[in-house]
Image (cartoon, rainbow, N blue to C red):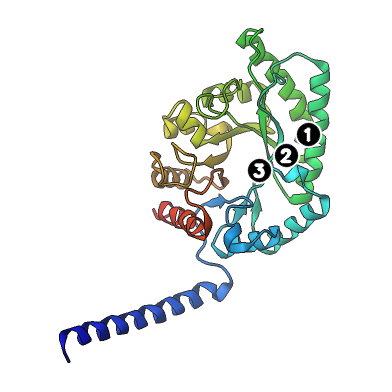
Amino acid sequence: MNRRKFITATLTAAAGVNLLESAAWGTEEHASGVKGKFKLKYAPHFGMFKHHAGEDHIDQIKFMADQGFTAMEDNGMMGRPVELQKKIARQMSRLDMQMGVFVAYGEFREPTLVKHDKAIREMLVERFRKAIEVAKRVNARWVTVVPGAYDKKLHRHYQTANMIENLKYCAAVCEPSGLVMVLEPLNAYTNHPGCFLTEIPQAYQICRAVGSPSCRILDDLYHQQVTEGNLIPNMEAAWDQISYIQVGDNPGRKEPGTGEINYRNIFKYLHGKGYAGIIGMEHGNSVKGIGGEKMVIEAYRRCDDF
């Protein structure tokens, strides 16, 4: 056999072995209907894997579970039809998946929680009553709160005091149901200029002052990398008030590995802390299409390998 024929035959045989190994590995993975589950509860959102699963919400949930994800979050859940909410909850229950956050209140432009205003307080109370009903329907424990813009006509300390008072009213509504508001500090440099709540120490101060188990922090590590960095020390300092984590790399707000944040180390830290909560995948895909969706899954596999 000449050299060219020998190499061709060798490569063909090797390819055949690889195909057999891949097929066997796939069979083993799907023996239980689920690929190897992640160590932590990373939560994709609708649309993240639509090129694999299609537009149907239930099919997307099935795909997430098949890839080993054990949670999901959906910012827009409150606006979805009741029957769809119920279908989503039933499917997640069948797949033993946990529901992450949805947005109960999100204001980015107008000062609201920073004001001492009876009408605003009544609006907030009514909003959280509705959120409780949705949370019961979809088996959610946490809801996101973006508390509004900075009021340029009022001293920051007065605004802080007003926010604490308003959140106490909202927490009193949420406590009997066990629903937890998680306040999300947002970065004012890249995405949300003018928002009042921007830093973890600031959110910590507010939650401690509210003094309710229904008022905690959502630490979105993308936003905090932009705002203040020092991610792990800030988590450590505010740990008793943090109930939810979201992630996205910086710059770009895409999957881990596309920016400057060492998410493998952060996930190792969270695992070591015994964090049993959800880690919301609050970011886009760096590459469009099926290839980009595979890259997202592979990124979490790499970061979860600690």
- Which residue is rendered at x = 78% and y = 44% of the image? 134
Judged from the image, the secondary structure of the residue bearing numbered disc 1 is: helix
Separation of marks 1 and 3 at Cα, in angstroms: 14 Å
Amino acid type for the residue under numbered disc 2: Leu
Res 123 → quadrant: top right
For the residue carrying disc 2, how many other residues have a C-alpha within 10 Å: few (<14), some (14-19), or many (20+)?
many
Residue shown at the point (57%, 28%) measured from the top left: 185
Q: Give above or below for 277 relative to 297.
A: above
Residue bearing mark 1 = 128
Comparing labels 2 and 1, the label whose residue is closer to the camera: 1
The furthest residue to the left: 2
Q: Which residue is mark 3?
A: 101
Q: Nearer the viewer, residue 208 or 77?
A: 77
- Residue 96 in sight from this viewpoint: no
Give the quarter of the image for residue 125: top right
Residue 272, compared with residue 23, is above or below; it is above
Q: Are marks 2 and 1 in contact (CB under 8 Å)?
A: yes
Amino acid, disc 3: Val
17 horizontally vs 63: left or right:
left
Q: Where's the N terminus, which quadrant?
A: bottom left
18 left or right of 135? left
Residue drawn at 75 percent across, 60 percent down: 90
The mark nearer the N terminus, 2 or 1, is 1
First in residue order: circle 2 vs circle 3: 3
Residues marked 1 and 3 touching at CB (< 8 Å): no
Q: Which residue is mark 2?
A: 179
At which x and y percent is residue 246? 55, 41
